[in-house]
Image (spheres, rainbow, N blue to C red):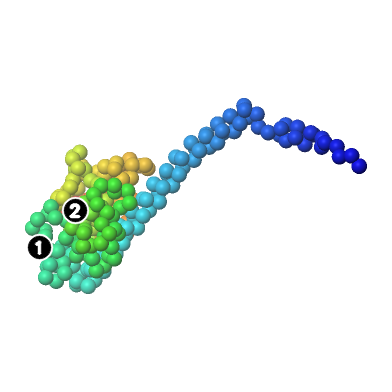
Amino acid sequence: NTLRPRSGTGTRSRLARAFTLPELAIVLVVIGVLALLAIPAMARTRARSSRIKCVNNLKNVGLGLRIFSTDSNGAWPWQVSTNKGGSEEFLQNPSLVWPHFLALSNELSTPRIARCPNDLTGIQPATWRVATTNSAFSYFFGIDASEERPETILGGDSNLELNGQRLRSTLVTLRTNANVQFDNSRHANPPPGAGNILFGDGSVRQVTSAGLRASLVLPGNPTNSIHRWLIP
């Protein structure tokens, strides 16, 4: 038997099935468009995830405060002497907010719980030993809050502005008509000027800056409610 060369039909068929340059260009363009569409969706998903983590961390701070209160006859850390594990004496220097968090070191396993993932400023302390600066923490304390008055504000995101000025390392007194708002550094999308607030009953609410100002109005004294907030 004589061996004959194989027909080239298969080769021609494979070549016929290959992409031409214009077709390849179209495929690459489609892939690029799909990638561009996917990137914003992924960014929104990441932002939502960080926002949820921020809410959960604030809830855990609230839980730590309530555990401390239960063990201290209803008092918050800033109402208990340092001799008894609190931080009351540090109210004399309101620029030092971190000692009030440090008083919760038995209730919170790590200082990272007191940081919002969207807070890109300050430090990221791994242990309480190095959490000795205000920039280690992302939440303020409402020192007039009460568990018996669940509508009072116990804490919240600390990226606050008053009359357009960023508040840092201070004890600020706010009244019902205070022009206070969240800046856009953490939860800008959506919506602009949004944040989280912790109430006396331990619940956390996501609010806009308008919602934050509305929360300053307390039942029983709607025109002249007073709030004192320790802001790191």
- For the N terminus, the quadrant is top right
Determine the residue positioned at 75% across, 32% down: 12
The reply, left or right, for residue 190 in relation to residue 74 is right
Quarter-wise, where is residue 188 in the image?
Answer: top left
| Residue reaching furthest to the right | 1
Q: Which mark is residue 134?
A: 2
Q: Position of residue 140 (x, y in %)?
A: 22, 54
Comparing labels 1 and 2, the label whose residue is closer to the camera: 2
The reply, left or right, for residue 72 in relation to residue 7 is left
Quarter-wise, where is residue 220 in the image?
Answer: bottom left
The reply, left or right, for residue 175 in relation to residue 49 is left
Q: Which residue is mark 1?
A: 89
Determine the residue positioned at 49% across, 40% down: 38
Query: Is residue 57 visible from the viewing direction of this image?
Result: yes
Query: Is residue 198 visible from the viewing direction of this image?
Result: no
**Which amino acid is tagged 1?**
Glu
